[in-house]
Image: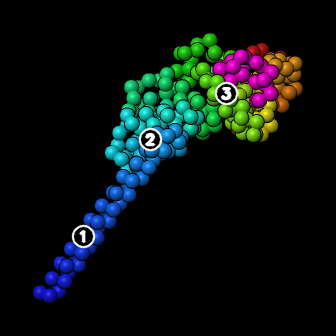
Amino acid sequence: MEVVIAIAVLCLIAAGIWYFSRRAQSGDDVHYADSIRKAAQSGDVIAQFKLAAMYYEGKGLQRNNEEAAKWYRKAAEQDHVEAQFLLGIMYERGDGVQRDDDQAYKWISLAAQQGHPRARTLLESDKWLLYLDAKTPDREGSGEPGPQIPEVPREQVDEYLRKAGEGDVDAQYNLGIIYYHGEGVEKDFEQALSWFQKAAEQGDADAQYNLGFMYGRGEGVKKDHGQSVQWFTRAAEQGHKGAREILDKMARKSMPGRKL
């Protein structure tokens, strides 16, 4: 009987420890969430992203997709690349926002411009290639550096210029795209070429691919077939599918007696 009582007492003690530890943990979660919220409200981009994640995942806060989207947007507007990508996904799925492919493409493409690997891969999917073709049907087969992007705010251009000046390869590539299309700045092929060149020399395959086109067409520089082939080759050596296809076409055209 004494053994049974002892076991019962131990069980009650263990239950009490578990209960009070859970209460303490809950209190810590509330305090942490309050701290994150205050920092987010003051404009801290990391806190905005963390708060959005807490709402989206239901960790430390009750799950609320509307609040998650709200705070992801605030972080995304401050150029937080993961927030841009996740906000795009939320618009694509209709999580916490009305489903909107235009908004989804906008935010996913902005993340891709910053080098986000999943965003870049996603934009190469059939869905988004068909979306882009429907929006810009005259671009089919143009070989134009892309993807073509929504209007870029001047503040974002300035931020890219700052980062690019510090050697950030993604910012250099983004500036090449921006100047090529004239998005947020006056179209300037020479500037586009200059920034693509800087990114290409750091090994960016997309920039190398775009340089191949620009040298081949004489955009922002004197037409130079040799340089065009050189940059396509460097991109192809890194596995760039488009560059490989261009080189294959060039090789077929050079074959005697072959009509294409």
Residue 6 horizontal/vertical position (percent): 19, 83
Whether the magenta-drawn stretch holds residue 245 is answered as no
Distance of label 3 from label 1 (alpha carbons):
58 Å
Residue 252 shows in this picture: no
In the image, which disc is placed on residue 240?
none
Label 1 secondary element? helix
Mark 1 crowdedness (10 Å alpha carbons): few <14, some 14-19, many ≥20: few
Residue type at mark 2 is Ala
**Residue ID for mark 1:** 15
In the rendered view of the protein, which quadrant contains the C terminus?
top right
Looking at marks 3 and 2 on the same chain, the residue that comes earlier in the sequence is marked by 2
Distance of label 1 from label 2 (alpha carbons):
34 Å
Label 2 secondary element? helix
Q: Give the range drawn in magenta.
A: 178-196
Question: Viewer-proximal residue, 228 or 59?
Answer: 59
Label 3 secondary element? helix
- Magenta stretch: dominant secondary structure: helix
Residue 54 shows in this picture: yes
Q: Indicate the quadrant where residue 80 lies.
A: top right
Q: Indicate the quadrant where residue 189 lies.
A: top right
Q: Which residue is drawn at 63% across and 15% down?
A: 139
Residue type at mark 3 is Val
Residue 114 falls left or right of residue 210: left
Question: Viewer-proximal residue, 118 or 143?
Answer: 118
**Residue ID for mark 2:** 52
Q: Residue 260, relative to residue 7: is it above or below?
A: above
